[in-house]
């Protein structure tokens, strides 16, 4: 799992998108996790996600507990390169 700051995400979203194709990327704001960027195929792997999103959203629970990292996980930073 990788992590980037919101500023890095805003500066280079294409880098985050490329990274998210391999594994989820946590975007932080003020050193706290804010959002997770993941590929659509990873999204579909979430437990209980049926083909129709509306059906899933009306179901019980959010199905994310297994997917989200624990507090013990230490995300690694993405090495950013300036895009000219």
Image: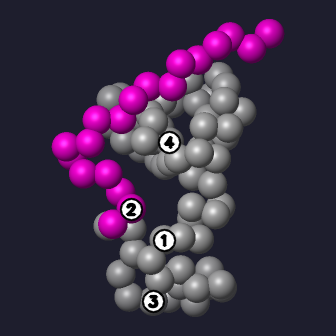
Q: Which residue is mark 4?
A: 25
Res 30 → quadrant: top left
Q: Which residue is mark 1?
A: 46
**Nearer to the camera, 44 or 9:** 44
Mark 2 in CB contact with mark 4 (< 8 angstroms):
no
In magenta, the rendered stretch is: 66-84
Q: Residues within 10 Å of mark 1 (few under 14, many from 20)?
A: some
Total numbered labels placed on residues in the image: 4
Q: Which residue is mark 2?
A: 67
Mark 2 in CB contact with mark 3 (< 8 angstroms):
no
Residue drawn where x is 58% and y is 17% of the image: 80
Image disc number at residue 59: 3
Real-space Cα separation, disc 3 to disc 4, in angstroms: 26 Å
Image spot of residue 49 (x, y percent): 53, 80
Residue drawn where x is 53% and y is 19% of the image: 79
Between circles 2 and 3, the one closer to the viewer is 2
Mark 2 in CB contact with mark 1 (< 8 angstroms):
yes
Who comes first in sequence, dot 1 or dot 4? Answer: 4
């Amino acid at each position: 799992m990788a992590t980037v700051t919101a500023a890095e995400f805003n500066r280079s979203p294409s880098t985050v998108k490329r990274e998210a194709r391999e594994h989820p990327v946590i975007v932080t704001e003020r050193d706290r996790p804010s959002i997770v960027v993941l590929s659509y195929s990873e999204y579909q792997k979430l437990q209980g996600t049926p083909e129709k999103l509306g059906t899933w959203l009306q179901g019980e629970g959010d199905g994310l507990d297994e997917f989200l990292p624990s507090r013990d996980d230490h995300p690694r930073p993405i090495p950013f390169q300036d895009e000219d």
